[in-house]
Amino acid sequence: MAKIEASLASLNARPLPAWYNAAKFGIFIHWGLFSIPAFAPRVGSIGEVFRKDYDRAVAMTPYTEWYWNAIRTPGTPSADFHRDHYGAADYAAFREPFLEGLKSWDPAAWAEAFRDAGARYVVLVTKHHDGFCLWPSAVANPHQSGWTSSRDIVGDLAAAVRAAGLKFGVYYSGGIDWTFNRQPLLTLGDFMASTPGGDYLDYAERQTRELIERYQPSVLWNDIAWPTGAGRLNRLFADYYNAVAEGVVNDRWVTASPARSLLRIKAVRQAMDRRIKAYMRTQGEESHGVIPQEVPHSDFRTPEYAAFQTIQDKKWEATRGMSHSFAFNRNDTEADYESFEALLTTLIDGAARNGNLLLNVGPRGVDAGIPGEQLSRLKRFGVWLRAHGEAIYGARPWTRSDGETTDGVPVRFTAVGGDLNLIFLGRIGEERVVVRDLTLAGLGRLVGEDSPVVLEQQGPDLALTFRATPTAAFAPIVRVSGAV
């Protein structure tokens, strides 16, 4: 393979590695010191918080991984919880309990659970906004001594994941590090303006290069923004691609610029917050998450608690937790977790629209255990994908992604080779269904049951007659051979 140069022309000419396009399903892991208190208020989705409580939304987020920021804002539920349970203890007091919990950690068991769920890659949060590193970094934090794990969590999980036959990737919070910028954040303007400068530029780049050199990650997943200018970032990308031939990078690499630095001026930040607040009030209840802005170079885009509704030319990856938080929230009950059917629909929607699903797991901090509510959903993914994965892995979008039966059941389409898959986002308990506005010819069969399905054109609609009525399981699939 030709050497990648540090230019946009060279970076953008590099094709998307085939493994990532085919994988469809990955596991995200948010786990760190914040998993010890494991607290965030039950306030609904992050989108709801920004709509209803914008002036302190960042401190009221449902994300438990933002706990350190939340407890620095008096009057928030997190600050009250911290006072009542930990008194005046500093956030750093969670380091030792977290490291103690590692004694119960079995990375091989995690990797086995992810593999059995049908995931093809795993992305670990190696450093979140609190700055704590889950590997014994040789790059010392100049503002928080000893701010790394003594155990090589990244290396241990990378070895286990690869032994299970999965790809391994790393997340790094390049845009936020509260050990370098300790000012409490309340609004989106505060958040966007808080990317550290000064000695953080070299620190973030050296740590990212260390992660690349040590672990050769197949995914380099940055968050929020990037502290250096575009030239340094492009060199980092080129060096990464030349070191990891099949590596991919996400889209959250907005670089430092004079325009972005203006946000450090309070009046500018306040003006932007007023505009954002007014805009958020116009958003309906269905607007739950965020879609990062496009950047000059990325391999895929990353809508968060959101998804694209149409087929996209550019590869994308929906990322979300199973509840409203990524990291474990002790407040969550079974009712707070999204249903398996809704999570599976996100995976199917992605496969039909040129996307992947990066589904988050939030383990506990005290014992490194994955909560039962999360494991049960992973197991159901595994059952469904073992029966129906041929319509998901390696699939590409068809000429359209969406359809509907005459009974109102949504249908999604994926193509594999010369075959077309009709994925019904519901349950079929009848011997015959009709899909509106669909013309097809070919041999039909029920995936997972190998039962023939007879196709019959009825004007603009397609009738499907099953020799054996599908089971009541969610999302049955009909594969039509030779239809593409």
Image (cartoon, rainbow, N blue to C red):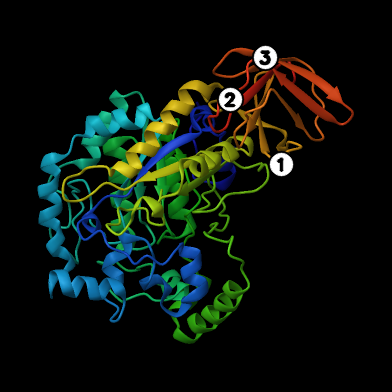
Q: Quadrant of residue 291?
A: bottom right
Give the residue displayed 49% in from the left and 77% down from the top.
262
Label 1: few (<14), some (14–19) or many (≥20) C-alpha neighbours in 10 Å: few
Horizontal and vertical percent position of residue 6: 49, 45
Q: Quadrant of residue 88?
A: bottom left
Q: Mark 1 belongs to which amino acid?
A: Gly
Secondary structure at badge 3 equals loop
Q: Earlier in the sequence, mark 2 or mark 3?
A: 2
Give the residue displayed 43% in from the left and 43% down from the top.
359
Give the residue displayed 31% in from the left and 24% down from the top.
164
Q: Quadrant of residue 60?
A: bottom left
Q: Is residue 67 left or right of residue 353?
A: left
Nearer the viewer's eye, disc 2 or disc 1? 1
Q: Is residue 159 left or right of residue 104?
A: right
Q: Are marks 2 and 1 in contact (CB under 8 Å)?
A: no
Label 3: few (<14), some (14–19) or many (≥20) C-alpha neighbours in 10 Å: some
Q: Mark 3 belongs to which amino acid?
A: Arg
178 over 417 or under it: above or below = below
Separation of residues labelled 2 and 1 (CA atoms):
22 Å
* Residue named by callout 1: 408
* Residue named by callout 2: 391
Q: Is residue 118 left or right of residue 38?
A: right
Horizontal and vertical percent position of residue 337: 40, 50
Nearer the viewer's eye, disc 2 or disc 3? 3
Q: Is residue 464 left or right of residue 336?
A: right
- Res 244 visible: no
Res 467 label: 3
Q: Nearer the viewer, residue 380 or 440?
A: 380
- Most extreme residue toward the right is 459
